[in-house]
Image (cartoon, grey):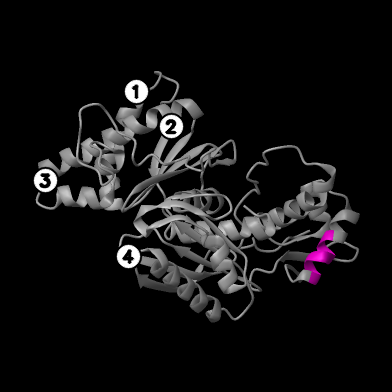
Amino acid sequence: MSTGAPNPHSFGSARHLRSRGKVLPEQARGHNRSLVLQTLYHSGAMSRADLSRETGLTRVTISDLVAEFIDDGIVVEKGVRETTGPGKPPILIDIDRSGHRIVGIDLSGPGVFEGALMSLDGEVLERREAPRPSGGTAAFEVVRDMARELVALSPVPVLGVGVGAPGIVRPDGVVLSSPNLDWTDFPLQRMLGAALDLPVMVRNDANAAVLAEYTFGQARADMLLIKIGRGVGAGLISDNQPLVGSRFAAGEIGHVVVGTDGGPRCACGKNGCLEAWLSASNLRGRLADATEEEAEDVLREAGTRLGVAIAPVVAALDLAEIVLAGPADLLDGTLIDAAIAALTARTLEGVYDDVVIRLTTQDDIVLRGAAVMVLSGQLGVS
């Protein structure tokens, strides 16, 4: 039996963001729906029998769920599988990857808001950007208008809208604090959903980015993604579970003071915050008139401060890797090497020597993370 060419829309073995608790009987159908769609999304087209074997669900359950998905326009039949033996060839089914689009918006850039119309596979199909306004109501209006424009560009229904915003964001999409956008207790998810009449998911930009690395990248089950741009923030995955924290501020490491020897003045008013050492804008400012030797010292110092900051996090959570998302010209080489050296020097010898610090290979990581937010929220796919 031949299965034909590999499906180009598959992402390796399926893996869920782990549930926080046991699946209760009343939750079983939702769990099964998510399991089936997760398997199809990551593995590509397969028969109903294949799906039953992969998921462990009965053929009756699979048949029932697939019929429901086809009625809802989520799954389509792709034709029959080529076979060489006797018997009726099985019909292949898959997520209808061309039947819906996702809109993603990234509010974390230093000068512009970015938005994209994307496929269900996270491919950017249309791109828009707008100058970052001062904040407040003006910022919301720019986000709303950009989202409306992107939705209007879609030739097929939009599954939902995902937004990555700087600051502390509650799971219900209320931006508790975002000084860069002048938002406090701002119900962005509710307001944008009402304006668009579509499902909207709003998360912190670094938490969105870590989802993109987890779903589309090669991230491990225990990892920290540090997003370095205008500010410094982090997203955490531990044992396949995203960590948000009781204050919804897990990963807010930018304003942790690194060391007791002072350091550059931070925008928050303190001296020596990680963001003051490491943000792209601060680094570029210190490198602007530096000689080659001075530039090496600046990058080495920034990398060392990064290693100091992450060493207790790595040890406390037993993380396998640190992924950096930011300008490669600043981060790759001297800075990462210094961070690895500092991490090794400040953790138990021989235990964390295999921890990897690397750059992400993904472009548009917040936009793609916004797509994962929608996929997870609407289909249970991660």
Q: Which residue is mark 4?
A: 134
The amino acid on which the numbered mark 4 sits, given as a three-letter code, is: Ser
Dot 4: element = loop
The residue under the point 38% across, 22% down is 347
Amino acid found under the numbered disc labelled 2: Val
Element at badge 3?
helix
Question: How far apart are the two marked residues, 2 and 1, measured between alpha carbons?
Answer: 13 Å
Q: Along the line of sight, which residue is nearer the eye, 278 or 353?
A: 278
Q: Is residue 74 left or right of residue 240?
A: right
Tell me if 311 is positioned left or right of 293 in this view.
right
Q: Which residues are magenta?
A: 65-71
Q: Which residue is mark 2?
A: 355
Task: Find out whether the residues at labels 2 and 1 contact each other: C-beta distance under 8 Å.
Answer: no
Alpha carbon distance from label 1 to label 4: 41 Å
Q: Position of residue 366 (x, y in %)?
A: 45, 57
The nearer-to-camera label among 3 and 1 is 1
Q: Nearer the viewer, residue 36 or 3?
A: 36
Q: Earlier in the sequence, mark 2 or mark 1?
A: 1
* Residue beneath disc 3: 292
Task: Please tell me whether mark 1 sits on a helix, a strand or a loop.
Answer: loop
Number of marks in the rendered image: 4
What's the CA distance linking mark 2 and mark 3?
29 Å
**N-term-proximal mark, 4 vs 2:** 4
Whether the magenta-drawn stretch holds residue 155 is answered as no
Residue type beneath disc 3 = Glu
Say if 352 sits above or below 32 in the image: above
Q: Residue at x 24, y 26 (%)?
A: 260
- Name the residue beneath numbered marker 1: 346
